[in-house]
């Protein structure tokens, strides 16, 4: 996976089937500690440009 970060970009190839795969992962941590089991929800905003 790639740590693109906020405001950065990554480029992936489009294959012969017109598919592009973005390997995305997330890591959650607590600065204060004391994290317990639970659910996490997130929203990812992406802009795509096809060249």
Image (cartoon, helix red, strand yellow):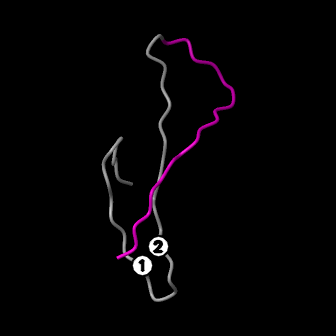
Q: Which residue is mark 1?
A: 14
Q: Which residue is mark 2?
A: 20
Query: In terms of depth relative to the viewer, which is nearer, 33 or 20?
Result: 20
Name which of mark 2 and mark 1 comes first in the sequence. 1
Image quadrant where one finds the C terminus: bottom left
Residue 39 position, x and y percent, is: 69, 31
Query: In terms of depth relative to the viewer, which is nearer, 40 or 50?
Result: 50
The residue drawn where x is 46% and y is 89% is: 16
Residue 17 position, x and y percent, is: 52, 87
Residue 13 position, x and y percent, is: 37, 75
Query: In terms of depth relative to the viewer, which is nearer, 42 or 25?
Result: 42
Q: Which mark is residue 25?
A: none
Badge 2 vs badge 1, beta-carbon distance below 8 Å:
yes
- Could you tell me what secondary structure mostly forms the magenta stretch? loop
Say if the magenta span includes residue 34.
Answer: yes
Image quadrant where one finds the N terminus: bottom left
The residue drawn where x is 49% and y is 19% is: 30
How many numbered tags mark residues here? 2
Q: In the picture shown, does residue 47 fall above or below 43?
A: below
Q: CA distance from mark 2 to mark 1?
A: 5 Å
Residue 48 position, x and y percent, is: 44, 63
- Left or right, residue 46 beside residue 39: left
The residue drawn where x is 47% and y is 10% is: 32
- Residue 23 placement: quadrant: bottom left
The residue drawn where x is 57% and y is 17% is: 35
Q: Residue furthest bottom?
A: 16
Check disc 1: other Cα within 10 Å, few if <14, some if 14-19, many if 20+.
few
- Left or right, residue 31 beside residue 38: left
Say if the magenta span includes residue 41.
Answer: yes
Q: Which residues are magenta?
A: 33-51
Query: In terms of depth relative to the viewer, which is nearer, 39 or 50?
Result: 50
Determine whether the residue tagged by mark 2 lies in a helix, strand or loop: loop
């Amino acid at each position: 996976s790639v740590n693109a970060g906020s405001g950065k970009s990554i480029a992936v190839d489009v294959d012969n089937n017109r598919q592009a795969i973005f390997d995305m992962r997330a890591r959650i941590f607590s600065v204060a500690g004391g994290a317990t089991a639970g659910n996490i929800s997130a929203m990812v905003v992406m802009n795509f440009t096809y060249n």
